[in-house]
């Protein structure tokens, strides 16, 4: 009886993992601005794994697929989290010095640093005492963060304290104190956003003093 219960629970867990809805798998209300300047308003679907954004309207039988090379930016209202999201096609060197446009989401915009993000869906192993093997695999969103500087250069962030301090090294002492005082976790999204916002605020204060 107990064994059968564990099996049922395992199937329930697997079913929930399969049924999960990801933002890149559904259509959203939004708009796309093309490089030529045209704006397409309607239903938008995106994939940062393929760097393709699709556009559709009620009178279109199929969607129009656009690569990052043809798009300036697009925005959507993501009903899975009930907020607007903005994406820009920006040049990035995936390997070597050759740059190609990739779609980045803007997480925290500011000067002199903007926090960007790219997402992908992948299987992750999750611990669960009710699973037969003690763990099970489920699909989850995985995020990779990038820092965009004022000169247009984009650097990938690898999620460590050392890397975060290095990215913001021109305000090294202030960032270290802020991270310690606020118990910042360098691998947690909201904490990365907080640090970038604080970093930008240091420059705002300096500009205010110049104006006075």
Image (tube, rainbow, N blue to C red):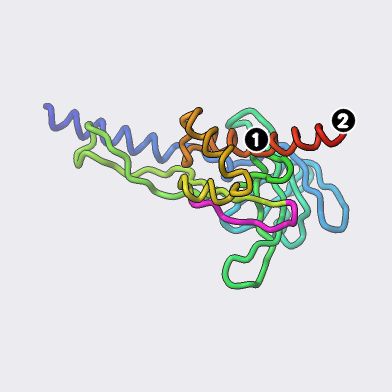
Residue 32 position in % (x across, y down): 77, 47
Q: Quadrant of residue 139?
A: top left
Q: Quadrant of the C terminus?
A: top right
For residue 35, side relative to residue 151 (left or right) = right
Q: Nearer the viewer, residue 16 or 61?
A: 16
Residue 146 vertical placement versus 205 (above, below): below
Which residue is painted at 47% across and 45% down in the image? Answer: 161
Residue indicated by mark 2: 212
Q: Nearer the viewer, residue 194 or 174?
A: 174
| Tag of residue 183 | none
Residue 182 position in % (x across, y down): 50, 28
Q: Quadrant of the N terminus?
A: top left
Secondary structure beneath disc 2?
Answer: loop
Callout 2–callout 1 Cβ contact below 8 Å:
no
For residue 98, side relative to residue 205 (left or right) = left
Mark with earlier residue (2, 1): 1
Residue 194 position in % (x across, y down): 59, 33
Q: Residues within 10 Å of mark 2 (few under 14, many from 20)?
A: few
Which residue is painted at 13% across and 32% down in the image? Answer: 3
For residue 18, side relative to residue 157 (left or right) = left
Which residues fall within the magenta stretch?
A: 150-158
Residue indicated by mark 1: 197
Residue 86 position in % (x across, y down): 71, 42
Which residue is painted at 87% across and 58% down in the image? Answer: 36
Q: Residues within 10 Å of mark 1 (few under 14, many from 20)?
A: some
Q: CA distance from mark 2 to mark 1?
A: 23 Å
Q: In this orientation, does residue 73 appear?
A: yes
Which residue is painted at 46% across and 30% down in the image? Answer: 183
Residue 192 vertical placement versus 154 (above, below): above
Q: Nearer the viewer, residue 137 or 72?
A: 72
């Amino acid at each position: 009886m107990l064994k059968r219960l564990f099996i049922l629970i395992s199937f329930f867990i697997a079913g929930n993992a399969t049924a999960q809805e990801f933002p890149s798998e559904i259509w959203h209300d939004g708009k796309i601005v093309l490089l030529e300047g045209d704006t397409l308003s309607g239903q938008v679907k995106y994939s940062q794994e393929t760097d393709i954004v699709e556009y559709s309207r009620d009178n279109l039988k199929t969607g129009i697929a656009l690569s990052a090379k043809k798009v300036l930016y697009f925005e959507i209202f993501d009903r899975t989290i009930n907020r607007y999201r903005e994406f820009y096609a920006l040049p990035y060197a995936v390997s070597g010095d050759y740059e190609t446009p990739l779609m980045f989401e803007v997480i925290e915009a500011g000067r002199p640093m903007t926090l960007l993000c790219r997402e992908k869906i992948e299987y992750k192993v999750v611990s669960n005492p009710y699973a037969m093997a003690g763990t099970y695999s489920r699909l989850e969103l995985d995020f990779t963060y990038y820092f965009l500087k004022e000169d247009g250069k984009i650097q990938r962030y690898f999620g460590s304290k050392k890397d975060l301090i290095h990215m913001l090294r021109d305000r090294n002492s202030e960032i270290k104190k802020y991270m310690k005082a606020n118990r910042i976790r360098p691998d947690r999204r909201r904490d990365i956003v907080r640090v970038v916002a604080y970093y930008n605020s240091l420059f705002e204060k300096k500009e205010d003093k110049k104006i006075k």
